[in-house]
Amino acid sequence: MSKVQYQLEPLTCPSCIKKIEGALGKMIGVQDAKVLFNSSKVKVSFNKDQVTSEELQEIIEKLGYPVISAKIA
């Protein structure tokens, strides 16, 4: 299981949390997705054999949230 943390531009509304977590949670290979509203970070646990961190980042950006940086653990 791999983990990645994305730093987003500041989130402006709590509904952003459900939008991002919902979209990532539906993806095959994603075990857990958590949005930290106050720090504008997204932490995702995923199976790298089923999905890549680049694909996850693409989903977040398609929702309208630019990713500033990504840290893969």
Image (cartoon, rainbow, N blue to C red):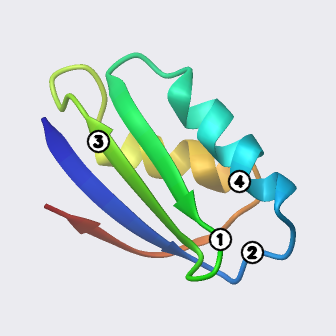
Residue matched to label 2? 11
Asked if labels 1 and 4 touch by Cβ distance under 8 angstroms, the answer is yes
**For numbered disc 3, what is the local secondary structure?**
strand
Q: Position of 49 compared to 22: left or right?
A: left
Between the residue at mark 3 and the residue at mark 4, the CA separation in whole angstroms equals 16 Å
- Mark 2 vs mark 1, foreground winner is 1
2 and 1 marks in contact (CB < 8 Å): yes
> Is tag 3's residue or tag 1's residue first in the polypeptide sequence?
1
Q: Amino acid at mark 3?
A: Ser
Which residue sits at x=37%, y=28%?
30
Horizontal arrangement in the rendering, residue 31 relative to residue 58 (left or right): left
- Contact between marks 2 and 4 (CB within 8 A): the answer is yes
- The vertical placement of 35 against 58, above or below, is below
- Going by the numbered disc 1, the residue's amino acid type is Phe
Task: Of the two numbered discs 4 and 1 on the same chain, state the one appearing first in sequence.
Answer: 4
Q: Which residue has dot 4 on it?
A: 17
* Residue contact at pointers 3 and 1, CB within 8 angstroms: no
Q: Quadrant of residue 66?
A: bottom right
Q: Which mark is residue 37?
A: 1
Residue under pointer 3: 45
Element on which disc 2 rests = loop
Cα distance between the residues tagged 4 and 1: 7 Å
Marked residue nearer the N-terminal end (2 or 1): 2
Q: Secondary structure at mark 4?
A: helix
Q: Could you tell me if the residues under marks 2 and 3 are in contact, i.e. CB atoms within 8 Å? A: no
69 shown above or below 19: below
